[in-house]
């Protein structure tokens, strides 16, 4: 049976920022088939300290039936993590191969969040154009989407880490932490 998140196309994600865990909502608007990230009026991703704050905020402030129905049915533990900083892990590696499947997934998810945020904010002029990031995306698709196994190793170049850091800076600048007053 599909999860509540799959049914509504909304997913609960955890993000670590300044050594603290926050939750946010990311997915798709099923009525329009467009990407969806719960954001404030300034187009910043709204982060919540816990699920109850997130749920209360959505129920009290969001007039999007699909999202309200999702939050009233989803379990607090149905979340995945999005990492914002890969520098420590990648600086010690020279190559990504089948020993690092979780890291492949984490980097791909991070890049997808970045791409969706650029698209939703109409910030194409801030798009990081990095040949090594594009090479990673292509190899990720080849390895996991089309084949579902690693056929190619990914050589980690300094330029790749630089591209991820630029993307991370954009995402961090696009965050608002919800404070329950």
Image (spheres, rainbow, N blue to C red):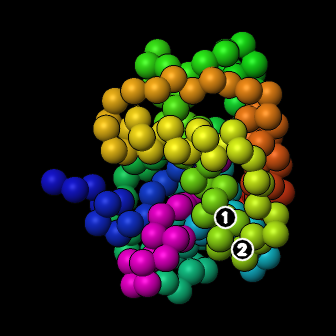
Residue 69 shows in this picture:
yes
- Asked if the magenta segment contains residue 57, the reply would be no
**In this orientation, which residue lies closer to the viewer: 94 or 105?**
94
Residue most extreme to the left: 1
x and y percent of residue 60 in the render?
A: 57, 78
| Magenta segment | 20-36
Please name the residue that numbered disc 2 is placed on: 121
Please name the residue that numbered disc 1 is placed on: 117
- The image quarter containing residue 107 is top right
Badge number at residue 171: none
Spatial separation of the CA atoms under disc 2 and disc 1: 6 Å
- Asked if the magenta segment contains residue 34, the reply would be yes
**In this rendering, is residue 133 above or below 173?**
above
Query: Mostly what secondary structure, the magenta segment?
Result: strand
**In this orientation, which residue lies closer to the viewer: 58 or 31?**
31
What residue is at 82 percent from the left and 64 percent from the top?
126
39 displayed left or right of 170:
left
Q: Quadrant of the N terminus?
A: bottom left
x and y percent of residue 38 in the render?
A: 60, 69
**In this rendering, is residue 112 above or below 94?**
below
């Amino acid at each position: 049976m599909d999860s509540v998140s799959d049914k509504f196309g909304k997913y609960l994600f955890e993000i670590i920022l300044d050594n603290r865990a926050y939750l946010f909502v990311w997915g798709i608007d099923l009525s329009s088939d467009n990407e969806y990230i719960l954001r404030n009026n300034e187009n910043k991703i709204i982060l919540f300290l816990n699920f109850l704050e997130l749920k209360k905020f959505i129920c009290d402030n969001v007039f999007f039936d699909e999202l309200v129905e999702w939050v009233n049915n989803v379990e607090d533990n149905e979340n995945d993590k999005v990492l914002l900083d890969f520098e420590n892990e990648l600086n010690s590696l020279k190559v990504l191969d089948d020993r690092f499947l979780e890291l492949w997934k984490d980097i791909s998810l991070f890049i997808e969040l970045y791409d969706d945020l650029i698209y939703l904010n109409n910030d194409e002029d801030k798009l990081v154009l990095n040949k090594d990031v594009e090479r990673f995306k292509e190899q990720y698709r080849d390895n996991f989407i089309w084949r579902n196994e690693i056929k190619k190793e990914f050589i980690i170049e300094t330029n790749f880490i630089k591209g991820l850091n630029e993307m991370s800076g954009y995402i961090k600048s696009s965050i608002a932490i919800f404070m329950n007053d």
